[in-house]
Image: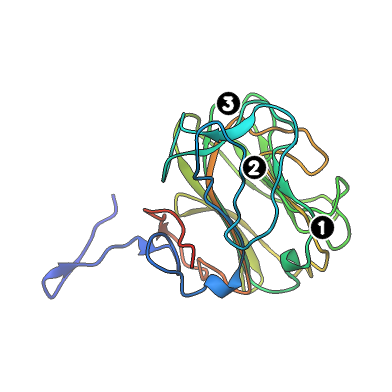
Amino acid sequence: MMMRRRQRGFFLNPYRYGGGGGGGGSDPQFSYVKALLRFDGTDGTTVWTDAKGHTFYHSGANMTLSNGQVKFGSTSARNNGNVNGVRCDAHADYQAGTNDFTFEWWQYITSTASAFVPVDMRQNSSGGSGGSILILSSGTNYQVYNGSNSLRTTATACLTTNVWQFYRVDRYSGTTTISKDGVSFASFSDSSNYTANTPIALMSAIQTGYAMPGYMSNFRFTIGYSRAQGSYPFTPPNAAFPLS
């Protein structure tokens, strides 16, 4: 059991707040944000608004905003079997290089029976020499790949169905960590130079397929700043990500 200690009349919280711009108010690191989709809109519509102005789109049926499960606001993104998910074409803004970076999102999955992808930032299905990171489920685990589809680490038993959970993949000073609800699950040494102008696919793989069953809320991609700053555990955001 984790204990809190009293100091000068107040309690010190052992769970540090989750980095600048955690939720609500304004984000002092907003200039480093490259993509931010709250997925907050009108139930049943397919308008994928990025606060940084990039064009995200989908094709096919069964990919909509939905009020079936909501973390913040009025809706979240629901994938009910769409193999294309929500995506943005390759863009220079998504070239992380050797910088620190963070991508993070809330998810509510309804099954772990089949492998699925919440976030894919590879150049193509082969990864590509300058490609970024792929997150792929395996049972109740998340596997983290980078470069030419190299498995780098596995976050074991980190997936739970029918509950909102906060995931963050964060590179800080050459170490990339995947965490859930503020707790570090796995990490690896990462000096990769992500030189490609990568696309972003959410709730499916770049090459289509691996549809994520369920809902996603508040996806944010930051380059040039680590939200976690190498410090775990942290408190997950308690409000939608700031838009400025």
- Residue at image position (64%, 24%) is 113
Q: Residue at x 82, y 57 (%)?
A: 147
Q: Position of residue 128 (x, y in %)?
A: 88, 56
First along the sequence among labels 2 and 3? 3
Decide if residue 89 is on the left or right side of residue 238: right
**Circle 1 SS class:** loop
19 in relation to 68, above or below: below
Q: In 3D space, how far apart are the residues under numbered discs 2 and 3 (Cα atoms)?
A: 13 Å
Asked whether residue 122 is in view, the answer is yes
Give the Cα distance between marks 1 and 3: 28 Å
* Residue 131 x, y percent position in the rendering: 81, 59
- Choose top left, top right, bottom left or bottom right for residue 82: top right
The residue closer to the viewer here, 44 or 177, is 44
Q: Where's residue 202, x and y in %?
A: 67, 44
Badge 2 local density, few (<14 within 10 Å), some, or many (20+)? many
Residue visible at 55% across and 31% down in the picture: 44
* Mark toward the start of the polypeptide (1 vs 3): 3
Callout 3 environment at 10 Å: few (<14), some (14 to 19), or many (20+)? some
Q: Dot 3 corresponds to which residue?
A: 111
**Tag 1 near tag 3, CB within 8 Å:** no
Is residue 78 in view from this perspective?
Answer: no
Query: Which label lies toward us, 1 or 2?
Result: 2
The three-letter amino acid code for the residue at tag 3 is: Ser
Q: Which residue is mark 1?
A: 147
Q: CA distance from mark 1 to mark 2?
A: 18 Å
Q: Amino acid at mark 1?
A: Gly
Observer-nearest of 125 and 27: 27
Q: Is residue 132 left or right of residue 174?
A: right
Name above or below for residue 80 compared with residue 33. Answer: above
Q: Which residue is mark 2?
A: 118
Give, as a three-letter code, the residue at label 2: Pro
- Which class describes the residues within 10 Å of circle 1: few (<14), some (14-19), or many (20+)? many
